[in-house]
Amino acid sequence: MRTPSAAAGQNVDWARHNLDLFGSRFSPLDQITTRNVASLVPRWLFQHGVIDGVSNQTTPIVVGGTMYVTDSRGSVYALDAADGRLLWTFDVTELIGGGAKAGYVFRNRGVCYADGVVYTAAGSFLFALDAKSGAPIKTFGKNGQASVILDVIKERHPDVTAAIALGYWFTTAPQYYDGVLYIGSTRSESHIPGGHVLAVDAKSGRVRWHFNTIPQDERDQGWEIAGPTWVGGERNGGGIWETPSIDPDLGRIYVAVGNPFGDSTKRIGTNLFTDSIVALSLADGRLQWHFQQTHHDLWDYDSGNQPVLFDMEVRGRRVRALAEASKNGYLYILDRQTGQPINPIRETPVPTASSREGEQPWPTQPIPYAASGEKMKPVSPIVPTNIPPERLASRTIVPQFTPPGPNQIAAPGTEGGASYGPVAFGKQTGWLYVAAVDSPLGSGRPARGYLSAFDPSTGELMWQKDFDGHGQAGSVVTAGGLVFTGSGSNIAGYFFAYDAKTGDLLWKFNTGAGVFSSPSTYMVNGEQFVAVASGGGERGRRGGDLIVSFALPQRTGAVP
């Protein structure tokens, strides 16, 4: 009997960056399975021609047989999802203002679709486009373009005429729910005075509410909590790198906040709400709870990926849970109603001796433990390994959370741990799948990628695999028992399929350039495809422009 997912002529969409409001990245499609994935082949390729970005990070969005992807600037391309034929293009290059001369680091992770409209965040603007034609929706902002970040920062900085002047722009795909777009602004390294979570009316482009991730004074909510955690004058960073998740039943939105920035001797304290998970009210953006994963960050340990929401049973009770993996190398699993840990997270003493005058490192860091009482296994090594002997002759391996200093080798490095690649939740296994990077600071060796499966109810590591290159691509889990993810490498970019239960590598394909993007899977006319963007070298510093869609071989006699 043919399964519902393989019904003749059926389409199954992937309409959001991480598939659904919970960010699960679990697809019910099961036409491609552990038994036949070894025969997977490229069905079509598309090149958009723009390779001036950091890397090709778009997630393909598919609705009704049409695919929507972006280049590194945020321009949108509509394709026939069955054969890759270009249908229309919307170019934002002349609309985002300034380009590279203004300091943009071009990267874009894609669009979202809702009610016949495609929304993209490019530069510091949101754009609304007709999904059929690509024409701007004239009632959204000004001719389809809304200056949402500028609208917010002008309240405090009335003389600013462009958001880029303060270092603000978007890298992430918007989230959509009930007529409202939700998105966060970057970029911490531009010295921004706090990132902004924005709720924007999807019809008009007007900002309904906003939340500053680093409250600047008593005018920003959360000031009474966060204000005392910044002493010395610095109050910058807190950008948001990934799409938020939404729980409509609880009426909450969940956001992962990036690192603090600036002179760390002038930001004494824990520096809330950086490196934190923040829960806000959908209705008005009021703070519900927060949980910080790294205190007084000295190591660039962002909370970069989207919090994934899921329900599970723990010790006989149903728990509405949330998980997010940090660049500090740990996976944090919380009750999303309360923000409290499911299993213990213990404030653990860490090194504090610093070679930098005036530095006051925080004396403890929150380390997750499994239900067994053992420390949770990290998502990538937190102790440097495989260090070349010549490096060990001139440098010293130091424990994690040692304040940075000369001639150190430390893990995870600034590229290490779990980056922006989102965590996936396998609804069949009940496990979380986490991509991460092993790249010790000062090691002088190439990075290695990691893919791990965790049981969130116990915190136990079920399996872990490593591979050449960066593990910055998020994953997709399918009802066919598979986990798809990619490898970012300076030499080549492999796209992998693993067995979701065992971690066995079942298939891989060399895309020719680094895979730093998160894949999607969809069905057109009863046929399942898996699509991914490829393009990027070491750390993605060489751009690329390829979209490749894979499927099982066509039947004999079919047109290839």
Image (cartoon, rainbow, N blue to C red):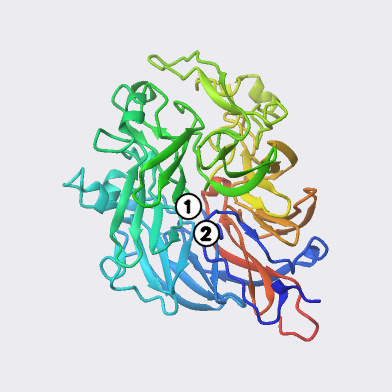
Across and down, in percent, residue 520 comes to 61, 62
Residue at (62% x, 28% y) in the render: 344
Residue at (32% x, 31% y) in the render: 235
Q: Is residue 94 visible?
A: yes
C-alpha separation, residue under disc 1 versus residue under disc 2: 8 Å
Is the residue 511 above or below the residue 357 in the image? below
Position of the C terminus, as image quadrant, is bottom right
Across and down, in percent, residue 385 comes to 69, 29
Disc 1 residue crowd, few under 14, some 14–19, many 20+, Cα 10 Å? many
Q: Quadrant of residue 528?
A: bottom right
Position of the N terminus, as image quadrant, is bottom right
Across and down, in percent, residue 354 comes to 47, 15
**Left or right for 298, reference 419:** left
Say which amino acid is labelled 1: Thr
Label 1: state its secondary structure: loop
Residue 189 marker: none
Residue beneath label 2, please? 17
Residue at (62% x, 66% y) in the render: 548
**Left or right for 305, reference 385:** left
Discs 1, 2 touching: Cβ within 8 Å: yes
**Left or right for 241, reference 123:** right
Q: Quadrant of residue 120?
A: bottom left
Residue 243 marker: 1
Across and down, in percent, residue 127 comes to 36, 65
Q: Outermost residue toward the left?
A: 159
